[in-house]
Image: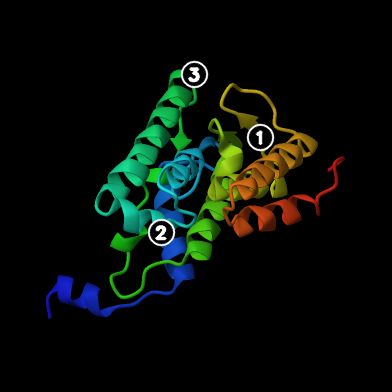
Amino acid sequence: MTPTEKSASRVRTWQEEADMLLSLLDCFVPEREAVFASSEFFTGKRFYDLCLENEARTPEELEKKLGPEYKITVLAKNKEQGRSFARKLRELGHKIVLTPVVFNVSALNDGRNWSGSEYMGFWDLIIAKKCHTVYLNEFWQFSDSCVFHYIAGLRTGKKLLDHAGNFVVLDSARKIVKSAIRRLEDYGIDVSNLHEALTVLKTFSSLG
């Protein structure tokens, strides 16, 4: 059996894969010396604007209407926006900037891709162990992942800053996420994940 065949036949658990990736990062990213660049990807302002333009209300509806253009119009543009945000942070002098938008989990294990919660769980670990600051790109309040990145940073005591370098305090975060939810629901869009995130935000003390 060749090394490739052995690799293809082995199925690791999520925790094993997460530990393996963290150990790789240990080779060149010291503990809590990175900043995290959070930017929209699967959901966010671009996604919701396109939903409204195409009379869609879910990712499935939008993908069906856009066809092959969906990955280009939504995911590819969001990925480039995330890369650009990370570059700007590096230009500000941050030596190590980590951004999740370029991370491809499907390449890790052909036998079982990560679920959405596993993907988010991995970045929670990265924020906790490798980062001292979480930067949130513009319009972060419309992105499920960005709001949960904010929560991960809040939970582990990181600095939480917006794209302009302003602190995003808890009370302000609650208000702008709640406002985003109301705006999207006015258009009939299901934002259950943002509701879940807002519920979590309400469990934190404003003094904590």
Q: As shown in the figure, which amino acid type bears the numbered disc 2?
A: Glu
Q: Identify which residue is drawn at 81% across, 54% down.
A: 203
Whole-Å distance between the Cαs marked 3 and 2?
Answer: 39 Å
3 or 1: tag closer to the N-terminus: 3
Left or right of 63 on screen, residue 154: right
Which amino acid is tagged 1? Answer: Leu
Asked which secondary structure carries label 3, the reply is loop
Residue 88: x and y in percent read 44, 23
Q: Secondary structure at mark 2?
A: helix
Q: Is residue 163 visible?
A: yes
On the image, numbered disc 1 is attached to which residue? 160
What residue is drawn where x is 80% and y is 51%?
Answer: 202
Q: Which residue is mark 2?
A: 61
The CA distance from mark 3 to mark 1 is 16 Å
The location of residue 129, given as percent across then percent down, is: 58, 49
Residue at x-position 68% and y-position 58%: 196
